[in-house]
Image (tube, helix red, strand yellow):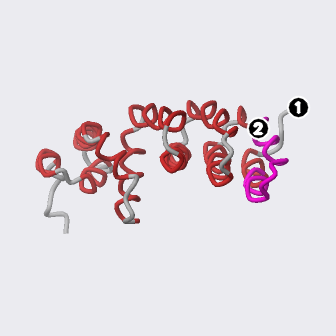
Amino acid sequence: MGLLGPPNVAKLEARGKIDGLVRAAGYKKDPAVAADARRALTAYLDTIIQRLQTKSLTQLDIARNALVVIGEPARDRLIFILQQGHLHRRQDAAFVLGMMGDPVAVKPLCVAMHNPDPLLRVILVEALGKIGDPSASETLRKALGDPDKAVAEAARKALKKLGPAPG
């Protein structure tokens, strides 16, 4: 084992192998290889966001993980989609923002809670719970009274993750 060496980022990039680039971005033995893979993934940002619409769960998982690896540029695009996109795109964006765990996404996720779609509100509340930022507490407390029971239950679980309110 171990004879393979580091991933060939240039080859993966040239072939558009997003799954390989996601794996290469996690390459621990050489931070430069991981950084090259993240840079290469960023160049595929539009393609990866389009892949969120796939019916293939494997491809969907790869796309979500790629967006998490890309980080800030992907986060900013996902926040834009959350604010302006088609309903299913908003759901995808909220889910991935939760996976990212970036507190910058908290305010846009809270603002999106005004959407009438209960599934989107559940995903938003779960994302806020994953991020775990106390600034979401007020929105989550309001969601406890959501007319949709699934939203209220998700809010209860998210608040539990945040821990007791300060004070």
Residue 139 % position (x, y) = 75, 37
Q: Based on the picture, tell me whether residue 9 belongs to the magenta stretch.
A: no
| Callout in the foreground (2, 1) | 2
Q: Give the range drawn in magenta.
A: 137-155
Along the viewing direction, whichever of 86 and 7 lies nearer the viewer:
86
Outermost bottom residue: 1
Q: Specify the principal SS of the magenta part.
A: helix
Residue 54 % position (x, y) = 37, 59
How crowded pointer 1 is (Cα within 10 Å; few <14, some 14-19, many 20+) is rated as: few
Three-letter amino acid code at the position of disc 1? Gly
Q: Quadrant of the N terminus?
A: bottom left
Give me the disc on residue 167.
1
Residue 15 % position (x, y) = 13, 52
Give me the disc on residue 137.
2
Q: What residue is at 49 percent from the left and 44 percent from the top?
A: 86
Q: Are marks 2 and 1 in contact (CB under 8 Å)?
A: no
Give me the disc on residue 147.
none
